[in-house]
Image (cartoon, rainbow, N blue to C red):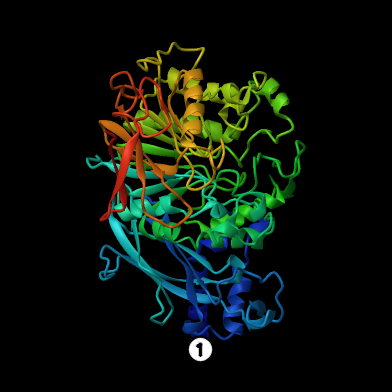
Amino acid sequence: MFRSIALLSYAGTISAAFTGNLNYQSPSKHHASLGVSISKVAKRTYANSPWEPSQLNFTHGVASGDPFDDSVILWTRAAPYSDNDKSNITVSGYVPLYDHSTEQYVASSNAPVCVEWKISESDALDNTIDSGTAFTSSDIDYTIKVEARKLRTFTTYYYQFNICNSNNTSPVGRTKTIPSQNAQVTDPVKLAIYSCSNYPFGFFNAYGNTVRKDSVDYVVHLGDYIYEYANGDYGWGNAYGRVPLPDRNIATLYDYRKRIATYRTDLDLLASHQNFPWIPVWDDHEVSDNTWRDGNSHMNNTEESFIMDGGVSVDQLKMNAVRAYFEWMPIRQVDMDDNLRIWRSFQFGDLFDLIMLDTRQYDRAITDVYWNTEYLADIHNEASRSLMGPRQETWFYRSLRESASRGATWRVIGNQIIFSRINNSVLTGDYEAPYNYDQWDGYQANRNRTFHAIYENNISNNIFLAGDSHASWVSDLVWLDEHPYNPATGEGSMGVEFAGSAVSSPSPVGQNVTLDTAANASAQLTAANDELQWQDFYYRGYYELSITHDKVEAAFFGIPTNSVRQGYEIPLANFTVVAGENKLRRSNGAAADGNVESGSLKGGQAVQTNLTHDTSSGVWITYNAP
């Protein structure tokens, strides 16, 4: 009798430890083929000998993300080997593992791995605030994702994982909660904005620079965290010792897991995850190039190619990519009953709402798959075309209205692609199809509906964020042809768009473009587009935002080289948006604080500078050339 009760209690503890790992339920409980049977995995806990702690490793560091005011997501991977899950074939409770020394598969225990975790306000990890136990297994690639609760608002915390009942520990991570919804925020909130990290194009130095400076509170990643290509198809990883694995165009669940794992070996990316909570969304390359609701450019299709799963239409390739993404990223589950959803929002006290959109995967109408460009030029303004689908659109416009109604000073909108109109014909020579129809320009009616929600409801202080383009763009937000706009003063604008360059992905005007050639292309674009105030094609990099009730300050940084791992950077340009003005602040006719280092500034100039660097911080210091 007592033994039965003890066994039931132990079984309940085991079950709770499995459900405590959110990746067993991720990304959705509603997709049969994405789910994992916890009861079947738990049986292996009883049937197999547990792992020796010394056999297990925290192979990819730690990470945190999706912070709330009282909780945050913590992540790690605890595995018996560095390679990814090869357990799609299991025999008698054992999983085949590849032994690189003998170049053959060998049997290994398939017992789940037990991990403990704790979080504290002290980096010594005393006075634990929350803790728990979680199991993981090959079924979810040995990843672990837990929610730490009972936390104080807008507070820095430290966390660590360890293999159960051992001193085998992970690195100590640092994270931070956000202010409570109705809190009065008096300190600046600082964000680093990244996108487009391509492993074979060089080292991810930009990720590490904010760690070296310790300059931000949170990281916002706007997508293209990985790329799906084989090395020779896009990049030259052999030159840097950075061949993405597996070295092929990825398609299977193993492929996507292995590709993310390879990217996560970059030391600067590891450092960023370890030191800052991330708020990420995907772009297209987390799945495939130029994805839309029912396909992608690699499939070269404009016909529906989906299957039905759990009553939801999804592409098999997308299902593999999404499952791996949710396993490996420190991201919360959201309502997944209608589709593979990632769009969500965060309320940073009374200071700002961060609204994260999905303009790629969720319900996007057909995009440019390279042979249908002229067709898209004909239909780009059709009312039925949507980047987001009707449900996300409705949620987005409601979120804007509710944010303004609750009195948040700013609305910060994270999306993947350039929102502002960009006429590229001066560069491409194509005056019949002058826009990039894979951006918002290909969905004019959707953009008009967004502007309508902003203008008609008089919603001010809007900051749009974008990535994707591998270049830097800064624009006033203007509903052209509907409202008057003065590009010299910014009057008529209803906000500002900041779009950043890539962490390492090449410039759209050429990987080895010269500074002069890039600057000339930028000058042509700023001249051809009234609302475009600054543009730079040359530098890889990122930008930071410092947000207060009075203003938003944006600082753009360029990386001198990604061919080696190094911590140098060049301050490129600084911009200010004053609360209530809804435009870039002008100084001597130019929308930048002083001159810019590179690119083309409307009403201003790029000043050639000499460069030195501060050896204590690794940051390049610029001063005017004599």
**In screen coordinates, is 386 left or right of 329?**
right
Q: Position of residue 446 (x, y in %)?
A: 57, 26
- Asked whether 488 or 173 is in front, the reply is 488
Q: Position of residue 424 (x, y in %)?
A: 57, 24
Which residue is drawn at the image coordinates 40% and 42% (left, top)? 558
Q: Amino acid at mark 1?
A: Arg
- Asked whether 556 or 544 is in front, the reply is 556
Quadrant of the snapshot with the C terminus: top left
Q: Position of residue 423 (x, y in %)?
A: 56, 22
**In screen coordinates, is 62 left or right of 417?**
left
What number of labels is visible? 1
Residue on which disc 1 sits: 3
Q: Position of residue 517 (x, y in %)?
A: 51, 32
Q: Is residue 370 above or below residue 583?
A: below
SS for tag 1? helix
Which residue is drawn at the image coordinates 39% and 24% (left, top)? 459
- Asked whether 411 or 29 is in front, the reply is 411
Q: Residue furthest front?
A: 626
| Res. 169 visible in picture | yes
Which residue is drawn at the image coordinates 48% and 75% (left, top)? 57
| Res. 66 visible in picture | no
Q: Is residue 247 above or below residue 469?
A: below
Tell me the crowding category of disc 1: few under 14, some 14 to 19, or many 20 or more residues within 10 angstroms, Cα based.
few
Which residue is drawn at the image coordinates 45% and 30% (left, top)? 535
Q: Is residue 460 above or below residue 330?
A: above
